[in-house]
Amino acid sequence: MCIRDRKKRESGNVFSFTLQFHDNELIRKTKPGRFVMVWIPGVDEFPLSPSGYNYEDLTLRLTFKVRGEGTRTLASLGVGSRVFVRGPYGNGFVIPKPESLSKKDVLVVGGGVGVAPLLPLVEALVSSSLRPYVICGFKSVNEAFFLEEFSKIFGISLIISTDDGSLGLRGT
């Protein structure tokens, strides 16, 4: 797979980039909450959950926090660099059928880089006529990301908290 777009620093040590695929097999199987294995030859292989995907454009967005040699190398790659991806794996999130619920309200909670795979989940919940209440937690305002993307999704309630109170509610 080839990195299509310039990587974007979301916050602190959190980066996103978009991969361009040439066939739709991997993209077609991607669902909210599933993960792919990213392999950088000679460096490392590690799991990442997509933070977005587009079935028509055959693209997959990955968002990750730099934590070790593999993610540090991944963050240093530029447009046109090649990485190897296999998967997706896992079962992903369960999207309940609205008719199976007494209420259509759904609570979605995530913190730090764990917020990244929640974006496609929230989009899928809204598409299924459910009403997500989304709570995102971060250490501080400097580590918050995807707030603009979440706020663009019509029909959700968004609550932000930070450990230090620099954004939204104070607390974990």
Image (cartoon, helix red, strand yellow):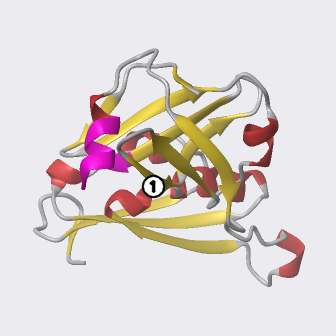
- Which amino acid does the dot numbered 1 rest on? Phe
- Give x and y (percent) for residue 10: 30, 39
For residue 135, side relative to residue 119 (left or right):
left
- Give x and y (percent) for residue 156: 56, 57
- Give x and y (percent) for residue 90: 68, 66
SS category of the residue bearing label 1: strand
Of 31 and 125, nearer the camera is: 31
Residue occupying the point 44% across, 38% down: 41
Quarter of image, res 97: bottom right
Magenta segment, which residues?
64-74
Q: Is residue 66 visible to us here? A: no
Residue occupying the point 68% across, 52% down: 88
Residue occupying the point 64% across, 59% down: 34
Q: Is residue 41 above or below residue 46?
A: above
Q: Is residue 73 magenta?
A: yes
Q: Is residue 108 above or below residue 126?
A: below
User: Badge 1 is on which residue?
Assistant: 46
- Give x and y (percent) for residue 82: 49, 25
Q: Is residue 132 above or below residue 78?
A: below
Residue lying furthest front in this view? 42
Of 21 and 103, nearer the camera is: 21
Residue occupying the point 59% across, 28% down: 1
